[in-house]
């Protein structure tokens, strides 16, 4: 998959693991990209999406963790 084509507003599917649970629980989620994070070298280092669960925070998804782009 070419992650260079992903832009703000696209929906990405990725796996989330909740390490607070014992045993850890993983699930597949789809979130809208809020911001593309560019490394100082010019490469894309990740995509900011709203966190899973409660709160109004963002988490960064690495390009290699993306399963599908919608």
Image (cartoon, helix red, strand yellow):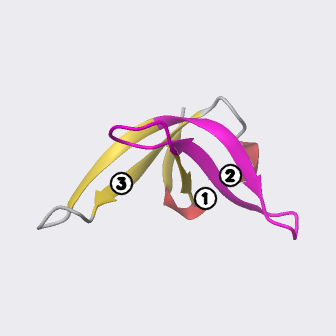
On screen, residue 61 above or below 23: above
The residue mark sitting in front, 3 or 2, is 3
Q: Which of the pair 49/28 is nearer the observer?
A: 49
Q: Earlier in the sequence, mark 1 or mark 2?
A: 2
Q: Earlier in the sequence, mark 3 or mark 1?
A: 3
Identify the image quadrant of residue 64. bottom right
Q: In the displayed orientation, state which residue is furthest to the front.
A: 55
The residue drawn where x is 55% and y is 42% is 49
Q: Is residue 24 magenta?
A: no
Q: Is residue 40 magenta?
A: yes
Please provide percent x and percent y for residue 41: 87, 70
Q: Which numbered tag is attached to residue 3?
A: 2
Mark 3 = which residue? 16
Q: What's the magenta region?
A: 31-57
Q: Secondary structure at mark 2?
A: helix
Q: Which numbered tag is attached to residue 63?
A: 1
The residue drawn where x is 37% and y is 53% is 15
Q: Secondary structure at mark 1?
A: helix
Q: Which of the pair 27/56 is nearer the observer?
A: 56
Horizontal side, residue 67 vs residue 47: left or right: left
Q: Earlier in the sequence, mark 3 or mark 2?
A: 2
């Amino acid at each position: 998959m070419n992650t260079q084509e992903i832009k703000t507003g696209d929906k990405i599917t990725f796996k989330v693991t909740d390490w607070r649970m014992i045993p850890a629980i993983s699930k597949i989620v789809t979130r809208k990209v809020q911001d593309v994070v560019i490394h100082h070298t010019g490469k894309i280092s990740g995509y900011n999406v709203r966190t899973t669960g409660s709160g109004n925070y963002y988490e960064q998804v690495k390009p290699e963790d993306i399963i599908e782009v919608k």
